[in-house]
Structure formats: structure tokens, C-alpha cells
Image: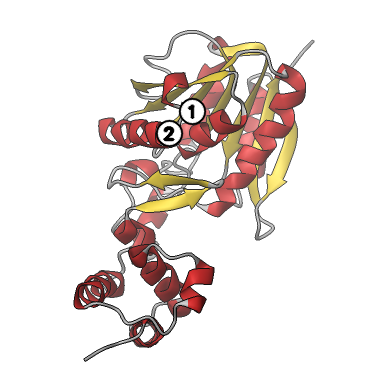
């Protein structure tokens, strides 16, 4: 029986709502649009398009996966971030819109300090490479090093660097934080694991089942990664360099204290689109 795009979309939306998904309409629209490679405008204008049996089968199969709480973008295999497209893998987190405020904040400080002179960036716990690749796309005179403890994450980041046209200025290092890092950097960035260990089991199944534990678990108090960065960064940061970090909504003071103790100055605190504390920018204290 023939089915139009609008009818199939309505059916998927209904199934998602009945399954108790919290944002059924958005999930249905993004999933179907992604599977059919249609823009939001095309979704509206092509509502009466008759879908093929193969298209309907692919949409149905994907819908079943979503009903079992696999995130939409993991089903699609990619997610947009800072106007770029990033492939996902089981070893990486999805880059999320709130992290874009960290990229914006780093750029606000990097451009006046470094201008168009060549520079070096380090992304600790790079995952998909989204933060570093977004920054490289905006700072064409910079070279970036993507560091991660996961070889699978680094493979994904390398593919994303190639896809987004920055692979000639992009290198990877498999390392536990600074252990195998060499040289100095003008910019160090990180979106490290910052969820407390005891909260992991209480997370939504979309996160708990499908996101890698290594990218989530920040230790007993959620601050393990920040301690490692605060304690180790001085040997790798240039004199006029900056450190940009994503943080949990309730971690601003605790993370700031860690860095102040190590001789850094907080030069900017940034909130995300929901008004929560989300990013901190530090510079080395100058006597």
C-alpha cells in the first residue's frame, strides 16, 4: 500500500509517543529526514511524496531501534556540530549543541591573542574530534593534536578531520591525558568525563547504554579529569596560552579552585543555551 512521507512521519511520531519517548515529534522528524537525506524545508515541501518499499523498511527498522532507546544520531551515524558533520562510533560521545559555547569562547580569546600567526592546539579526550576540528576550521593557521585513550575514538576523529578538510593540520596521540604528549600548545581544550561515578547507573538509557563509560565517568566527585589537566598542563601550555574546558552545570567553583591552586586565572565563564554554567577559560597567571 502506497504511503506518503507525511503519513509515514505521522505514524513514526505516534509510535514514539506511545513508547514514551520524551521528544517524539522531534525525534521522528530528525530520524526520517536523516534517513532520506532531506532538509527541514524539503520535509515540508515533499510531504505528499510516495515513499518506496525500501525507504519505508529502512525507516521502520530505524524506528524500532529508537523505541529501544538508541539515540537518533547514533542510528543515523552522524551529528552536526558548529556547522560541520561528524561521524559517530561506539567509542565516542555525540557532540552536543551546548558544547558549541566552548568553541565560541576559545575563539573569542584566541583571535585577539594569536591573530593569524601559526599556532598549536591540543584537544584532550577528543572523542569525535568535534571541538578541535571546529576550531581548526575557524583558525586556518593552527595545527591540532587530538589526544584520547581510545584508539577507536582516534580513528573516528581522523575520519572526521578528513571529511571536514583539516586532516593536513591534524594529528592524533593515543594517551592517558598528558602521558605521551610532547611540545607546547597555544590552546588546550577538553570536554572531559565529569559525571560522578555513582550517578552513571541513574542516567537515561539513551546515555547509560549507548555512550562509552570512559567518556562519562569523572570519578567519585566528577573531578578526576580536571585534576589531571590542572596538574599537568603547565608543562605544555605556552606563556600566552589559554585552556578551555567544558564543565558540568554545578562544577564551576570546584573546577575553578583546582586551576587557581595551580597558578591559573579564570578569564571567562560561559553559560550554555539553557543558562547553565558550561565552559571555563583559563590563562596562566602572570606575576
* In the image, residue 111 above or below residue 57: above
- Residue under the point 61% across and 26% down: 139
Badge 2 is on which residue?
126
* In the image, residue 238 above or below residue 76: above
Q: Residue 254: in sight, yes or no?
A: no
The image position of residue 155, as x and y in percent, is: 29, 32
* In the image, residue 224 above or below residue 90: above
The image position of residue 221, as x and y in percent, is: 48, 44
Q: Quadrant of the C terminus?
A: top right
Q: Residue 160: in sight, yes or no?
A: yes
The image position of residue 84, as x and y in percent, is: 50, 44
Badge 1 is on which residue?
123
Could you say whether the residue bearing mark 1 is in a helix, strand or loop?
A: strand
Which of these two is toward me, 273 or 33? 33
Q: Quadrant of the N terminus?
A: bottom left
Point out which mark residue 230 bears. Answer: none
Q: Classify residue 27 by image quadrant.
A: bottom left
244 vs 146, left or right, is right
Tell me the crowding category of disc 1: few under 14, some 14 to 19, or many 20 or more residues within 10 angstroms, Cα based: many
* In the image, residue 61 above or below residue 132: below
- Residue under the point 20% across and 75% down: 57
81 vs 268, left or right, is left
- Residue under the point 33% across and 41% down: 214
CB under 8 Å between callouts 2 and 1?
Answer: yes
Could you say whether the residue bearing mark 2 is in a helix, strand or loop?
A: loop
Question: What is the distance, in whole Å, between disc 2 and disc 1 at their CAs?
Answer: 5 Å
265 vs 1, left or right, is right
Amino acid at each position: 500500500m502506497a504511503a506518503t512521507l507525511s503519513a509515514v512521519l505521522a505514524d513514526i511520531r505516534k509510535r514514539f509517543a506511545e513508547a514514551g519517548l520524551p521528544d517524539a515529534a522531534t525525534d521522528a522528524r530528525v530520524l526520517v529526514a536523516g534517513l532520506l537525506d532531506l532538509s527541514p524545508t524539503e520535509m515540508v515541501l515533499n510531504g505528499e511524496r510516495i515513499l518506496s518499499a525500501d525507504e519505508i523498511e529502512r525507516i521502520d527498522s530505524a524506528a524500532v531501534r529508537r523505541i529501544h532507546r538508541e539515540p537518533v544520531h547514533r542510528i543515523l551515524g552522524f551529528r552536526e556540530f558548529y556547522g560541520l558533520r561528524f561521524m559517530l562510533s561506539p567509542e565516542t560521545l555525540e557532540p552536543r549543541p551546548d558544547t558549541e559555547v566552548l568553541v565560541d569562547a576559545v575563539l573569542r580569546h584566541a583571535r585577539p591573542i594569536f591573530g593569524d600567526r601559526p599556532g598549536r592546539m591540543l584537544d584532550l579526550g577528543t572523542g569525535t574530534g568535534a571541538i578541535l576540528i571546529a576550531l581548526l576550521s575557524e583558525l586556518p593557521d593552527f595545527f591540532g593534536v587530538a589526544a584520547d585513550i581510545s584508539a577507536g575514538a582516534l580513528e573516528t576523529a581522523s575520519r572526521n578531520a578528513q571529511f571536514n578538510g583539516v586532516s593536513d593540520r591534524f594529528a592524533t596521540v593515543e594517551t592517558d591525558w598528558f602521558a605521551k604528549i610532547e611540545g607546547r600548545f597555544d590552546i588546550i581544550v577538553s570536554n572531559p568525563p565529569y559525571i560522578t561515578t555513582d550517578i552513571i547507573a541513574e542516567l537515561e538509557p539513551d546515555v547509560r547504554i549507548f555512550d562509552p563509560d570512559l567518556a562519562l565517568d569523572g570519578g567519585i566527585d566528577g573531578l578526576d579529569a580536571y585534576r589531571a589537566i590542572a596538574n599537568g598542563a603547565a608543562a605544555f601550555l605556552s606563556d600566552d596560552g589559554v585552556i578551555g574546558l567544558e564543565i558540568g552545570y554545578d562544577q564551576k567553583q570546584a573546577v575553578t579552585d583546582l586551576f587557581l591552586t595551580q597558578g591559573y586565572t579564570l578569564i571567562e565563564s560561559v553559560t550554555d543555551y539553557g543558562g547553565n554554567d558550561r565552559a571555563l577559560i583559563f590563562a596562566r597567571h602572570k606575576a
